[in-house]
Amino acid sequence: MSIINRISIAWTLIALCWIVGPKLDFGLGLWLLGYRKSLIDDQYPALVSWVYYLLLGTTVGYGLHVGWTERSPILMIASVLTIFKWLIILFFAALLLTMAGV
């Protein structure tokens, strides 16, 4: 596979995760924090949420791998920001759940 194809696939996956993430309302992350009523149950099946989180992990790993092997620091930074986006949202979700007394 050529360098351009690998980098294009990595960028496409990162963009997909950034676009789809807010649409799913991060229901799995809230479930892992102890909030048992999923926010996405009314809109999406649980399988969609699980597939998204598997895609997220794969995307970050693939982005870091391609960024490292092809010497693309911008791609590596985008992959790391994708990780932190997820962690930051979980942090704020935990903070909101704590403030709500859940």
Image (cartoon, rainbow, N blue to C red):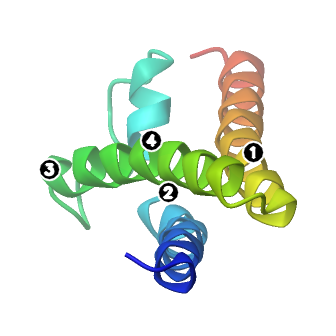
- Mark pair 3, 2: CA separation: 14 Å
- Mark pair 3, 1: CA separation: 25 Å
Instruction: Determine the residue positioned at 26% across, 67% down.
Output: 43
Q: Give percent across and percent down for residue 70.
A: 67, 61
The nearer-to-camera label among 3 and 2 is 3
In the image, 77: left or right of 66?
Answer: right
Q: Which residue is mark 2?
A: 25
Q: Earlier in the sequence, mark 3 or mark 1?
A: 3
The nearer-to-camera label among 3 and 1 is 1
Q: Earlier in the sequence, mark 3 or mark 2?
A: 2
Name the image quarter holding residue 37.
top left
Q: Which residue is mark 1?
A: 80
Out of 12 and 3, give the one closest to the viewer: 3
Instruction: Determine the residue positioned at 51% across, 79% down.
Output: 12
Out of 43 and 3, give the one closest to the viewer: 3
Tag 4's secondary structure?
helix
Instruction: Determine the residue positioned at 65% across, 32% down.
Output: 90
Query: Which numbered marker is on residue 15?
Result: none
Tag 2's secondary structure?
loop
